């Protein structure tokens, strides 16, 4: 395939607002899930949401650190992210005025890993920049889609009957793609049943690293079901075995956990480890890396889609903006707020239209109102980090 033409320069690359950040706040808010969510690494009933704000010029920007409470999907946790932001990242932000996303990313680059912590601050910064300059996130990053296609991720269920019910429910609501979480013992047969009931739908599976290369023959059975993709079947940090597996599978492999930044994405594509990439802003360390992955994949004609981490409306709003970029051609794991939560921290909540799309807001920053009363009522901890007087 021919490479696509270069992407137009995005406003963000030229944004030169000089923002002196006065304070950063870290806040945890516990939101109950409307139903438990189970994957190959466990089951949760509530989500400890980690919100981070950046305040400068009297305006506050909002971001979300998507780390979980336990180091299962990723080594990062709410606790490690608090530590890394408090002791390393926040001081780097507060040290002197921030001149752009690139400036921020360069300050974080010398700290290894901790991508979700870095991303939380990049999100807050971009919301702040949007509010200060009157631009929406989608405008800032060069988004082109006014509505984005979305799918739903269905956790492991107690029974196949319950799973089939869930599938029916979300298809009826309009979701364009169903993703089934799988693990050994909950894979071939459940996929067969769902596919039999729904021969035409976009269907994919996500193993969250539950298999090894020695399971090749087992996994090859999935080739019978015309799946859109198999997400992260092997080790969380592997590229090599995925390349070997992809060579034997007709179905496209999509990498999630293994893609921790733009450099890894390029390596995965060069090695043939996958044919599709799931982009999560948190996992890759923020907008700077997410945009770089998008641009690299767009140029190579590799489809990308926006993954999810059971975000509150704030993280969800950032995901919507990201998914408005032209290369996001497959439905994202961007469900309605009500898919997970009885009430969201933004107004209005995220809605999925009956055609399975979500509207991309055009208001400044994330384009949603922050429900501060609700956030305050549900807040468990708040920690404030302020600039020192000796700032240059
Ligand atoms: O692997 O994509 C994943 C949720 C938490 C951690 C990892 C994953 C997921 C999901 C749900 O699949 C995505 C969502 O709806 O937010
Ligand atoms: Mg995944």
Image: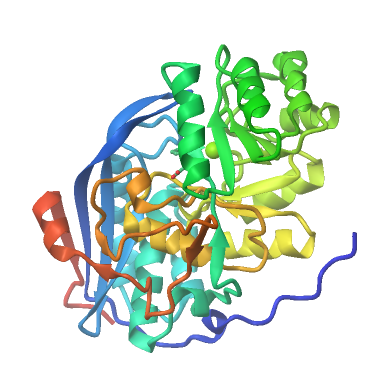
Colour setup of the view:
rainbow
Q: Is residue 323 left or right of residue 117?
A: right
Q: Quadrant of the C terminus?
A: bottom left
Residue 180 drawn at (x, y percent):
55, 31
Is 338 placed above or below 193 here?
A: below
Is 134 placed above or below 280 here?
A: below
Residue 221 drawn at (x, y percent):
75, 19
Q: Quadrant of the N terminus?
A: bottom right
Q: Is residue 301 left or right of residue 264?
A: right
State the residue in front, 113 or 17. 17
Q: Residue at x 55, y 84 (%)?
A: 11
State the residue in front, 187 or 108. 187
Q: Residue at x 14, y 54 (%)?
A: 382
State the residue in front, 43 or 21. 43
Q: Residue at x 55, y 52 (%)?
A: 332
Residue at the extreme right of the image, as rendered: 1
Q: Evaluate whether residue 367 shows in this view.
A: yes
Residue 175 drawn at (x, y percent):
53, 48
Residue 35 drawn at (x, y percent):
31, 33
Picture quadrant of residue 236: top right
Q: Residue at x 32, y 52 (%)?
A: 312
Is 340 placed above or below 211 here?
A: below
Picture quadrant of residue 347: bottom left
Q: Is residue 50 left or right of residue 366?
A: left
Q: Evaluate whether residue 289 shows in this view.
A: no
């Amino acid at each position: 395939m021919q490479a696509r033409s270069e992407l137009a320069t995005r406003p963000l690359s030229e944004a030169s607002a000089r923002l002196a950040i006065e304070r950063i706040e870290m806040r945890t808010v516990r939101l109950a899930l409307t139903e438990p969510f189970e994957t190959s690494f466990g089951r949760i009933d509530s989500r400890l949401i980690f919100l981070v704000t950046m305040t400068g010029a009297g305006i506050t920007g909002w971001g979300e650190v998507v780390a979980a409470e336990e180091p299962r999907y990723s080594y990062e946790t709410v606790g490690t992210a608090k530590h890394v932001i408090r002791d390393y990242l926040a001081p780097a932000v507060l040290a002197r005025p921030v001149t752009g996303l690139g400036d921020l990313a360069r300050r974080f680059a010398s700290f290894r890993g901790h991508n979700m912590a870095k991303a939380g601050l990049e999100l807050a910064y971009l919301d702040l920049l949007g509010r200060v300059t009157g631009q929406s996130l989608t405008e800032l990053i060069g988004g082109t889609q006014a509505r984005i296609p979305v799918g739903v991720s269905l956790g492991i269920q107690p029974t196949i009957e319950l799973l089939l019910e869930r599938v029916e429910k979300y298809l009826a609501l309009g979701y364009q793609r169903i993703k089934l979480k799988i693990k050994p013992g909950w894979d071939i047969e459940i996929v067969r049943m769902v596919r039999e009931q729904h021969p035409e739908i976009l269907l994919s599976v996500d193993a969250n690293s539950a298999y090894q290369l020695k399971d090749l023959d087992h996994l090859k059975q999935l080739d019978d079901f015309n799946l859109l993709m198999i997400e992260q079947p092997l080790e969380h940090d592997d590229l090599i075995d995925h390349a070997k597996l992809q060579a034997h599978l007709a179905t496209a492999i999509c990498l999630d956990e293994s893609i921790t930044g733009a450099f890894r994405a390029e390596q995965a594509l060069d090695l043939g480890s996958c044919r599709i990439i799931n982009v999560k802003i948190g996992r890759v360390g923020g907008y700077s890396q997410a945009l770089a992955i998008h641009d690299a994949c767009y140029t190579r004609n590799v489809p990308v889609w926006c993954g999810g981490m059971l975000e509150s409306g704030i993280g969800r709003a950032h995901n919507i903006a990201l998914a408005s970029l032209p290369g996001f051609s497959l439905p994202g794991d961007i469900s309605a707020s009500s898919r997970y939560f009885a009430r969201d921290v933004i107004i209005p909540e995220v809605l999925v239209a009956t055609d399975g799309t979500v509207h991309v807001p055009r208001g400044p920053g994330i384009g949603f109102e922050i429900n501060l009363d609700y956030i305050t009522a549900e807040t468990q901890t708040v920690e404030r980090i302020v600039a020192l007087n000796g700032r240059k």
